């Protein structure tokens, strides 16, 4: 019974959030579920390759912060819409964070030794290289400032 109550509350919060943001509630719900799957895949990876409670806490804090960023960006999107500045940020924001979480799930699977089609592993490797290269450029720029 308690599980049903928790699910109803969770669903209601997601629905209200999506309603006030002017988004499709299914998109918000999918993003939250994918984020939870990413957390679960990280836990499985941690158990398999060696548990690190500091890394786990940091990961959970980063996920919470990700939620805050998405919420802030969606609030900005809603404010722009109210001011009749029609930029469709909401779906793009959720889509981008969905992609990040799905790539993270696949990356965790690769580390665990799960075999994926070559096209997927190549895509994940390219995405990681792009992110790592931009991170290195930012580090160099910070050192030069």
Image (cartoon, helix red, strand yellow):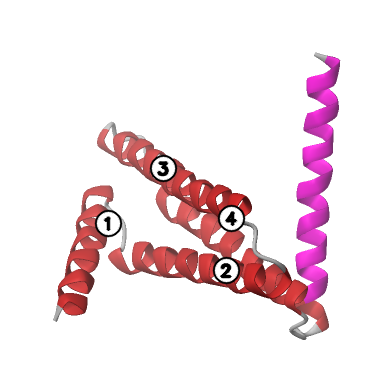
Per the model, the C-alpha gap separating discs 2 and 4 is: 10 Å
Magenta highlight range? 121-144
Q: Position of residue 54 (x, y in %)?
A: 60, 49
Q: Mark 3, residues whose alpha carbon is within 10 Å: few (<14), some, or many (≥20)?
A: few
- Please tell me how crowded label 1 is: few (under 14), some (14-19), or many (20+) other residues with Cα within 10 Å: some
Which residue corresponds to the image point at 70% horizontal and 67% vertical from the top-left? 50
The image's mark for residue 68 is: 3
Q: Say whether residue 127 is magenta.
A: yes
Tell me the number on the disc at residue 43: 2
In the structure shown, which secondary structural element does the residue marked by tag 3 occupy? helix
For marks 4 and 1, give the CA distance.
33 Å
Element type where label 4 sits in the image:
helix
Secondary structure, mark 2, is helix
First in sequence: mark 1 vs mark 3: 1
Q: Is residue 60 above or below residue 83?
A: below
Q: Quadrant of residue 9?
A: bottom left
Q: Are marks 1 and 3 in contact (CB under 8 Å)?
A: no
């Amino acid at each position: 019974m308690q599980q049903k109550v928790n699910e109803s509350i969770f669903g209601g919060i997601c629905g209200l959030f999506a309603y006030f943001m002017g988004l499709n509630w299914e998109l918000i719900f999918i993003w939250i579920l994918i984020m939870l799957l990413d957390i679960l895949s990280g836990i499985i990876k941690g158990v398999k390759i060696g548990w690190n409670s500091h890394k786990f806490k940091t990961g959970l804090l980063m996920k919470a912060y990700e939620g805050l960023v998405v919420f802030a960006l969606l609030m900005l999107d809603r404010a722009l819409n109210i001011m009749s500045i029609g930029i469709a940020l909401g779906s793009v924001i959720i889509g981008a964070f969905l992609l990040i979480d799905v790539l993270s799930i696949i990356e965790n699977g690769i580390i665990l030794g799960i075999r994926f089609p070559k096209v997927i592993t190549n895509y994940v490797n390219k995405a990681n290289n792009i992110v790592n290269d931009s991170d290195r450029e930012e580090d160099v720029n910070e050192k030069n400032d």
